[in-house]
Amino acid sequence: MNQNLELEFLSVFVSESRELIQEVEPQLIQLHQSALQTGEIDSSSVNAIFRLFHSMKGSAASLGLANIASLTHRAETLLDLIREGKIAVENEHVDSLLRALDLTGLFLELVESNHNDHGYDDEKEKIETELESLIDRAENLKKTDKKAGKVKKTRIEEKPPENVSPGKAPVAIPAFIPVNSADPGRKSIIEQFTEEGSDFLDNAEGLLLELEKGAENPIQKVRELFRGFHSFKGNCGFLGLEMLENMSHKAENILETLFDYEMIPAPEHIMTFLIIVDVFRHAMTDLATGGTGDIEGFQAVANLLDQMKQAVENEEKGHKKLGQILIEEGVVTQEQLDAALKRQKTAIGEVLVDMGAVDAQSVEKALIKQTEQNAQTSSISKGIKRSDIRVDLTKLDKLVNLVGELVIAETMVTRNPDLKNLALENFDKAVHHLRRVTSELQDVALSVRMIPLAMTFQKLVRVVHDLARKQKKKVKLIIVGEETEVDKTMTEQIADPLLHMVRNSIDHGLESPEERVAAGKPETGKVMVEARYEGGEVWIIVSDDGKGLSREKIVSTAIEKGLYRGDPANLSDEEAYSFIFEPGFSTKETVSEISGRGVGMDVVKKNIEKLKGRITVRSRPGLGTSIYLQIPLTLAIIDGMLVRVGEARYTIPLLSIRESIRPLKTAITVTPDQQELVRIREELIPVIRLHKLHGKTPDFFNLDEGILVIVEDQGRKAALFIDDILGQQQTVIKGLSNYLNQAKGISGCTILGDGAVSLILDIGGLVEKAGRADRGYFDQEAN
Amino acid sequence: MVESQRHDFSEDYDGEDDGEDTQEGKYLSFRIGNEQYGIEIKHVTEIVGIQKITEVPDMPEYVKGVINLRGNVIPVVDIRLRFRMKAIEYDDRTCVIVVNVEESPIGLVVDAVREVISILPEQISPPPSVARGDISRYIKGMGRFENDVIILLAIDKLLFDQRLTQISA
């Protein structure tokens, strides 16, 4: 565990440092060049470079990477002198600093492979001496300057630093660089920082809420929080965001205390932390939109933090450090503890904490183990390498599309009609191999754009928490399937709809605790958010066990608003409920009456339509409401069954198929309105004659000659009448052109091995039609 | 109609790499029945022979279905039927002109493709005001080329005009 954690830290350190070096290297060169040309120093880049070394030094020291720490310390000192305008930038300085950067890079490699930075002693010695002498010279220069009262002229700087024109003067450097400075490097750093920061905040929020609920292993959570705040602080420091740095430092301190004494934060502390997370989030938004990240409310937060610190420290007195207990009980000696603590500082820590739970021998063993660590870790795989790159989404799209093409091309080759009836042993082997590689490639390519819904769902936790408090309702949020991965654009598009739906569930769906008790329901209402794959779609279901929708009120409002003219009796429940998604359907006076849904629900509809998804509402008075969002995966590869109706070949998603049968004549019943039903065991299932629906000429007209494929969607079944089953295959779903968007009962198409296009049947749509079959829907449709 | 001028575009499409500016005033002419039509070359991406069309249900009659164009599934529209002319059997002269309108590729089934011609703006007369039916609304102008008159189509209107879609649907 400890080892893994340490590896994790090291790997983060390595990848972050590499990125920093890459950012700063050009700046250093730029700095030098501009200094050569104009004789002035660009204060913002000096600051940035200085900060790089500063933050690397800090991280390296805390990770026990002494070489990196000492090297960066010297570079930092030199830069500090430049930064303060004590010395001018000279070739030598830049050269040494660049060499220092290079060497740091080498050290990082060592860290990556051996998990320590031992090596390159000669080089380190050399560069450090170099830097040292430069620093000495600068210091001396400073002194002489002071004594002589004048500034020695340098090669590139003609003016004494004191007189450097304001604007760019390094004399009075602002505490941080303005964020909106035109420096593109900085901008991208900010961008990344805000993105990472937001992620961290989401994560922190989740942890806090779990803690509040009384999660298992709370200490672990506190530690995670601590770690998060720690690295957040580091980033803030690097960017010179003093306020944020300060704030997170305070938060970190509190968490450290909590963690050290194994205390579980009190509910009011969690509340405070949640407030902090909010304030930070505002700051992130501010930064992202070009602000300075200084926002109102900081002072209040600072006060809160100070209070909390006080409170925590008071509590802490009641706790004893674990190490002290160990000593008191005589299981470890003071020396051992000191040694351990020292290790804890230099290496990763909490060895003692974790090991201490066992006995003294284990502690000692752990200490010995740690001393041997270097030898050991090098034998552990290089598993700490971590590399993220940011890629343009359009490039990914292209890749995904090409992979789709490849899958089709593969089928075209391997199922080529020319190969029929040939015995090709070697070819078949090669085909087998090819298929394995393409299918793996497919998985990888598709997964690249996919991200789990967890992040999107996590945001709801907070919404529910806040809203429940505000409304004085008791709400339990159940999240199911947050690991379901969907396309990135989808997570963006459904974030708002989810928010609105959950908000509506709590606001209008769930009753107050009193009402619930009166209705014989548990006091605490349930809101469930669920995601799962269903056929070629992702389903996101938001349901509650509230009072349900009132059909009459919705319909009457719809008529009142002129959305519906006609006999309300003709509307199915589903049609009636769908009015809640009409823009402007909900107005203040209707909101509370008709259990309100409609606030922002048009957003839900709009966004889901953008994703070519469907919305279904189901509601039962007194029992609750469920809203189903059924969204197709953008480009999915599904298993499909290829069936034939006359000349036409259709693909049916395998997931929707329950069984295929050839019915007996006796199993068929025809209703007076000519709807055929097939009886399978105890069920009567409506038959859909595909040939009729699509105007084809089939081989068979009698149901007992062809095949019935029983399909199911959302628990509703239908029997599709076809001539023949041709086989199963991997199917790359291609969307139908927008030009054809009226096509009903078709969800897309795919390209078959012989190059022909096969339509993929939209089982949901078909089953829905079948469900209305008793109204003679089919005959109208087919004729 | 000069038969020798007929060009097999599906063969030498790849060789055509006219720059944007040289496309001005150039039209691809094709034949439907006895008349010659033209569309601006800038809309045209390629010309392919007729191939197996997969029918799509619930479409207006002139939307014949979809074809597989090197892995892209594109809809095809029969211009003949679009103008409510009588359908004819497809033969080896029948071509699909692939155009790119409003970012989406669409195939146009025509009786035969002829050639790329240049028509100067002064050679184009406005569409006749007394043309029969709505069809004149999809005519950009009447081009005079050598001894022929070529009906220049406003392809975007032709494909995306909601009114006609509804009439035929």
Image (cartoon, rainbow, N blue to C red):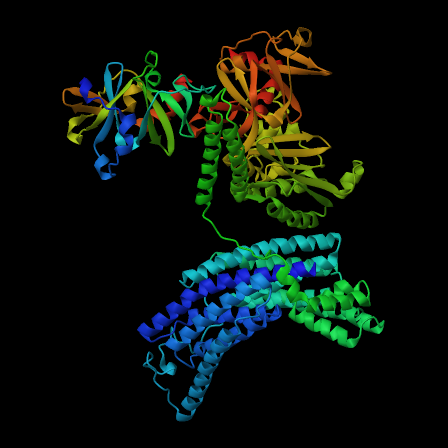
Q: Nearer the viewer, residue A545 or A112?
A: A112
Residue A590 lies in quadrant = top right
Viewport quadrant of the N terminus of chain A: bottom right
Residue A337 appears left or right of A481: right
Residue A623 lies in quadrant = top right
Where is residue A730 shown, x and y percent of the image? 54, 29
How many numbered marks are there? Answer: 0
* Residue drawn at x 53%, y 55% as measured from the top left: A387
Q: Nearer the viewer, residue A363 or A781?
A: A363
Looking at this view, name the residue that lies furthest to the right.
A329
Residue A748 appears left or right of A230: left
Up-down: is B27 above or below A544? above
Where is residue A605 shown, x and y percent of the image? 54, 35
Q: Is residue A743 visible?
A: no
Where is residue A512 shown, x and y percent of the image? 74, 42
Up-down: is B106 above or below B2? below
Q: Is residue A318 visible?
A: yes
* Residue drawn at x 59%, y 71% as measured from the top left: A61
* Residue drawn at x 65%, y 50% as measured from the top left: A462
